[in-house]
């Protein structure tokens, strides 16, 4: 199996629901990030073999193979094929796994993985609003439940308290604020030109450039403690749950042959990837076995990892992962996570890989591990290794 190199990783700012990015169609946002990644990498678009995109709610404006629509919307070569996948919140991380596997197997030389979710325009669950896909055959084995309930069940199992989740939510906001104050995110952001919308959500004819994440908010322990629980929750509030957001992200991978022939700069190597299944009722414990499995595949230990990026779907998900594996919290989500920044579901996997790469480069670390929980009982895992030079 051949080596797989990351030659570029970037993302849009993460837009708050109904705010700066909400006037864009999903294909236009994703296409702008795809084009931005190509421009930054120096990859000739004609040399991209395939595009694999992640998207959760593949309906309406996000239907019809959104990865392909986005690519064509930028006037990029029509000969380049694209596929859109759904592994729930881990969709774009699984897209990266699929692209890396193609390169490692010698099937392709250059693959772009990416993801998008415009939750302002296509609310989560829009593709199942006419009825659940779970029929009687499914319910003979599992009782359908919600991610909110799953997060509460995890908190109960690991004896995680409201005080702990509030402290985690506060830390996420503080770390994200520090990251922006120190311009840690600036290098990974593709500024996006978006329409300005009026109060009735109609275009004003004006545009604005969005270049900063919009989800951060002034937070204190006292304000978090005063928040009401999310409906259906026993422990989490809006301050300890991921935000509904808009965003897109992109990773370009290449083989050793392509790197040499096209004069590309390899910035990191994909060491190992995985996708695991877990109980679909508790549903959100996937990062725990995914971390174990991807470390085993890589021949590494927890002590080898410099940076962990684990999606903050809910505070209890990351806290349970830390408790179960004995993770040092100082290495986890050092620039904040989805609680502060937002969670545009289909794009978050690629966003986490992007942030992990840039943080390794900023700090000089060697290894980063990225993991996510996913609806329906899945867990994603990826380890990347920063390359010198």
Image (cartoon, rainbow, N blue to C red):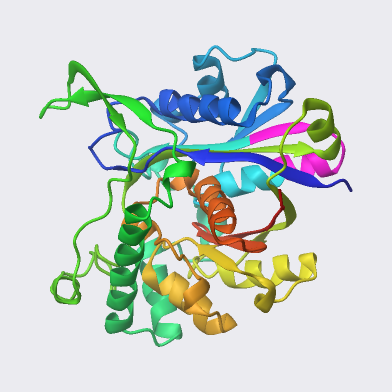
Q: Is residue 176 above or below residue 250?
A: below
- On screen, residue 184 versus residue 349, left or right, reads left
Q: Is residue 381 visible?
A: yes
Residue at left 36%, top 65%? 175
Residue 192 in the image, given as x and y percentages of width and height:
37, 29
Residue 218 in the image, given as x and y percentages of width and height:
19, 61
Instruction: Name the residue at the front extreme.
Output: 389
Viewer-proximal residue among 27 and 136: 27
Residue at left 45%, top 25%? 27
Viewer-proximal residue among 269 and 145: 269
Q: Quadrant of residue 312?
A: bottom left
Q: Is residue 68 above or below residue 377?
A: above
Residue 69 in the image, given as x and y percentages of width and height:
52, 20
- On screen, residue 280 versus residue 22, left or right, reads right
Q: Is residue 366 above or below residue 133?
A: below
Q: How many marks?
A: 0
Please give the range of residues in magenta: 99-112
Residue 258 in the image, given as x and y percentages of width and height:
81, 31
Residue at left 26%, top 34%? 20
Residue 384 falls within the magenta-colored stretch: no
Residue at left 52%, top 75%? 321
Q: Is residue 133 above or below residue 273?
A: above
Q: Quadrant of residue 84?
A: top right
Q: Quadrant of residue 212?
A: top left
Viewer-proximal residue among 79 and 332: 332
Instruction: Name the residue at the bottom extreme.
Output: 159
- On screen, residue 216 versus residue 341, left or right, reads left
């Amino acid at each position: 199996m051949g080596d797989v190199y990351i030659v570029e990783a970037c993302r849009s700012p993460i837009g708050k629901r109904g705010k700066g990015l909400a006037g864009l169609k999903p294909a236009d946002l994703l296409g702008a990030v795809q084009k931005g990644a190509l421009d930054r990498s120096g990859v000739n678009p004609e040399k991209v073999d395939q595009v694999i995109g992640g998207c959760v709610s593949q309906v309406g404006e996000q239907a019809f193979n959104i990865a392909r629509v986005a690519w064509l919307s930028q006037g990029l070569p029509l000969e380049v094929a694209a596929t859109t996948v759904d592994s729930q919140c881990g969709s774009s991380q699984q897209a990266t796994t699929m692209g890396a596997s193609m390169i490692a197997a010698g099937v392709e030389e250059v693959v772009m993985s990416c993801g998008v979710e415009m939750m302002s325009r296509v609310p989560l669950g829009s593709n199942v609003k006419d009825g659940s896909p779970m029929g009687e055959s499914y319910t003979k084995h599992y009782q359908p439940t919600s991610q909110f309930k799953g997060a509460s069940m995890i908190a109960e199992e690991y004896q995680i308290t409201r005080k702990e989740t509030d402290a985690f939510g506060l830390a996420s906001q503080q770390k994200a604020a520090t990251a922006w104050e120190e311009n840690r995110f600036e290098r990974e952001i593709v500024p996006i030109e978006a329409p300005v919308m009026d109060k009735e959500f109609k275009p004003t004819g004006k545009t604005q450039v969005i270049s900063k994440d919009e989800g951060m908010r002034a937070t204190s322990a006292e304000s978090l403690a005063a928040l009401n629980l999310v409906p259906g929750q026993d422990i989490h509030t809006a301050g300890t749950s991921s935000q509904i957001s808009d965003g897109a992200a992109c990773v370009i991978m290449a083989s050793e042959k392509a790197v040499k022939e096209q004069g590309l700069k390899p910035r990191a190597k994909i060491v190992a990837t995985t996708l695991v299944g877990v109980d679909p009722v508790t549903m959100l414990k996937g990062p725990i076995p995914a971390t174990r499995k991807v470390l085993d595949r890589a021949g590494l230990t927890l002590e080898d990892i410099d940076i962990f990026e684990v999606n903050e779907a809910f505070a209890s998900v990351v806290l349970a992962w830390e408790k179960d594996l004995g993770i040092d919290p100082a290495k986890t989500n050092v620039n904040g996570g989805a609680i502060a920044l937002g969670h545009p579901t289909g794009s978050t996997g690629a966003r986490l890989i992007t942030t992990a790469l840039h943080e390794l480069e900023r700090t000089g670390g060697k290894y980063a591990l990225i993991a996510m929980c996913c609806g329906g009982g899945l867990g994603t895992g990826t380890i990347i290794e920063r390359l010198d030079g």
